[in-house]
Image: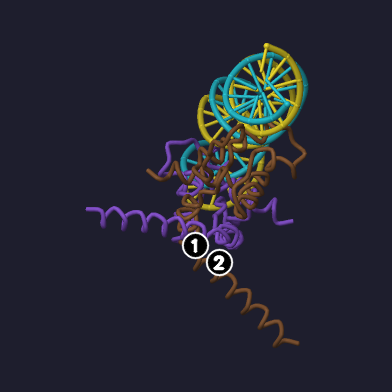
Chain colours: A purple, B brown, C cyan, D yellow
Amino acid sequence: MQAQQLDRTFAALADPTRRAILARLASGESSVTELAKPFQMTMPAITKHLKVLEGAGLISRGKEAQWRPCRLEAAPLKEASEWVDHYRKYWEESFDRLDAYLQELKEKR
Amino acid sequence: MQAQQLDRTFAALADPTRRAILARLASGESSVTELAKPFQMTMPAITKHLKVLEGAGLISRGKEAQWRPCRLEAAPLKEASEWVDHYRKYWEESFDRLDAYLQELKEKR
DNA sequence: ATGGTAATATACCAATAGGTTAAATAACCA
DNA sequence: TGGTTATTTAACCTATTGGTATATTACCAT
């Protein structure tokens, strides 16, 4: 099913380095070396993160001379968004409750 | 910041058992034993999943005689949703490209 | 050919995740 | 008091994760 796809997507998003890489790619293609620059991390570590992202379908790789540029592939995020969105009413509810509580406090004063 | 919160939220969502537990809790509070029923898994395993969910703030626990009921807490999903939503335009773009491509195919026939 | 640059592969390590069994705790019931 | 039910803790296991250092591959330029 797409359950495994969600597994991979959410797991990929659970790491701040990987989220930052996606953010960077939102402003355009990038080489691995460029992507690595903001991080205090060796290249192989970045390569591994890229594999995780690629495995989740969140990036794709190109080939250009000795560079293998990365590009954002946002499609899996759509599924993730849809999954999360099923719960929208629940978090809106809880903010309603919070609102009500704050209102109540205000009236007491 | 909330980066760690996102780490925990996404990591919690990366497991199908935990997503199923949240889905179950969407229809109301539940005891641990009830939650465990659909799974081929021992109770301690479920307890661990619940700890992960609780650590991410996705559930809260009550106390009622010998039961410790779980309740959905959707607030962290709001942040997750907002994070993902930054990429909405990218997946919509790629569907636009797909649409264009399918349109092109159709015209060729 | 040789050397520099980009990236990956390989081998290793420590910490974490996800599961188990068995024992412990806690609250009810009789 | 003792027994039953609900849940957690503890100890353990294996696989995965996230990182390292080092070696290797691939391409380009001279």
Look at the picture and state if B26 lies above or below B96: above
Seen at 44% across and 41% down, the residue is B4
Q: C28 left or right of A25?
A: right
Residue placed under numbered mark 1 in the picture: B87
Q: Which mark is residue B91?
A: 2
Seen at 65% across and 38% down, the residue is B32
Q: Which sits in the foreground, A102 or D11?
A: A102
Q: C11 left or right of B83?
A: right
Mark 2 and mark 1: Cα distance apart in space: 7 Å
Seen at 55% across and 52% down, the residue is A67
Quadrant of the image occupied by residue B109: bottom right
Q: A40 left or right of D14?
A: left
Name which residue type carries label 2.
Answer: Trp
- Which chain letter goes with mark 2? B
Can you give x and y, in whole percent of width and height, for residue A97 in the image? 42, 56
- In the picture, the quarter occupied by the N terminus of chain A is bottom right
Quadrant of the image occupied by residue B5: top left
Name which residue type carries label 1.
Answer: Tyr
For the residue labelled by badge 2, is the local secondary structure a helix, a strand or a loop?
helix
Asked whether the residues under the numbered discs 2 and 1 touch, taking CB atoms below 8 Å apart as contact, a structural biologist would say yes
Can you give x and y, in whole percent of width and height, for residue B34 in the image? 69, 42
Q: Which mark is residue B78?
A: none
Query: Mark 2: few, some, or many residues within 10 Å (few <14, many ≥20)?
Result: some
For the residue labelled by badge 1, is the local secondary structure a helix, a strand or a loop?
loop
Is residue B96 something that shows in the picture?
yes
Can you give x and y, in whole percent of width and height, for residue B57 in the image? 49, 43
